[in-house]
Amino acid sequence: MAAGRILTGMRPTGPLHLGHYVGALENWLRLQREYECFFLIADYQAFGDHLDEIDRIRRSVFDVTLDWLAVGLDPEASAFVVQGYVPEHAELTLYFSMLTPKSWLDRNPTLKAEIAQIESEHDTITMGFYNYPLSQAADILLPKADLVPVGEDQEPHIELTREIARRFNRAYGETFPEPKSLMGRVPRLLGLDGQAKMSKSLDNAIYLSDDAKTVQRKVRRMVTDITGSHPRLQASDPGVVEYNPVFNYHDVFNPNADEVADLKERYGRGTVSDGEVKDKLVDALNTFLDPIRDRRAGYEAHPDRVAEILEAGSERERKIARETIGEVREKMRLTYTPDALTAPAGKRK
Ligand code: TRP
């Protein structure tokens, strides 16, 4: 028996990077044997601000699926779901939009920051974008998930999901669980440039699909002093480990703790070059990425198989989605049977 149900997902807006791995995927891999899992490719959510880039989204659906398969998520054990293949996601979003006060979205810190970012680029946001946290609540509650393993920035959306579940249950009777979130081992991986976050839009990422040469090139260009005021000009200059993001990556990705301790010690004393610290990281990262590359190559040669995985996984969720929607319609009394003619014309609540 599974310990419970998981729904989690990503929007298909580009290939996944190391930050996705340690922030989320690593947890998914561990949990896929314990829980019944639904891994969602949130194409509707991507349309909210990228509808004019449909080619990129269509491609990214495959990129994200390949990344998931490459890291070792198992499509037999877990359902890989395309949000748009299960239109019940849209239907539940609509119902939730009628229960949810606008102020609950206005105060959502993740949404607020994203809107500010978009507006600072002199773009306007669409209603679809504004509403996405609510659609995310529908994603999670449609299969009645108990647990949502995600990155740190998603927490406000899971909180909103619990609030909506509570409100629905109070109005219409116990229906939805109040799901918990689960953060990854490294909630926020630094960027190659030392910025607080690794991200595609900041162009400071190593992708799970990068080849060995690309990883080497990117690591060699990494910033080694986040303060910008403690340059280390030669190997004999004593360095400060905490200022150098390369060590942060060693801590996260280099399983050889003795090697890392030795590099740190020599860095502090000024007996190791930046080049050696970086080369050891390149080795560690490529050792980590090699099995991922092998698995990707196996699937990349068979796009039909990948498309089938998405269809089969979506079909699996859809059966449950239909049941939930049936229950919701009944509880909300969105059923036009003749008794509607004789029931007293009351108010909701
Ligand atoms: N917002 C998530 C992201 O940006 C994607 C997502 C959509 C999601 N629906 C979800 C995450 C449901 C967890 C649960 O990647």
Image (tube, rainbow, N blue to C red):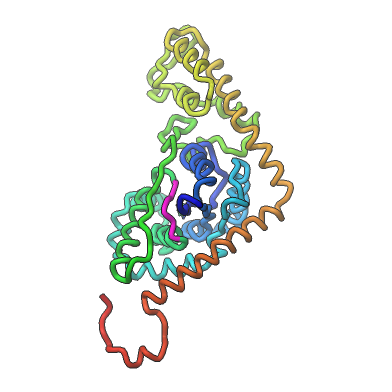
Image coordinates for residue 179, horizontal then vertical, percent: 38, 54
Magenta extent: 144-149
* Rendered-image quadrant of the C terminus: bottom left
Percent of width and height locating residue 344: 27, 89
**Quadrant location of residue 345?**
bottom left
Is residue 21 visible to the viewer in this orientation of the structure? yes
Membership of 108 in magenta stretch = no
Q: Which residue is pictured at 50% across the width and 16% down the height? A: 258
Relative height, residue 96 to residue 120 (above, below) = below
The answer to if 145 sits in the magenta stretch is yes
Q: Which corner quadrant of the image does residue 319 belong to?
A: bottom right
Q: Nearer the viewer, residue 158 or 34?
A: 34
For residue 276, above or below residue 152: above
Residue extending furthest toward the right: 301
Image location of residue 322, percent across then percent down: 51, 70
Compared with 139, 233 (above or below) is above
Residue at image position (67%, 40%) is: 295
Q: Is residue 333 left or right of residue 261?
A: left
Residue 120 in sight here: no
Q: Could you say where residue 262 lies in the image, as x and y percent from the top left?
A: 49, 12
Residue placed at 57% from the left, 38% from the top?
Answer: 207
Q: How many numbered marks have been drawn onto this rendered protein structure?
A: 0
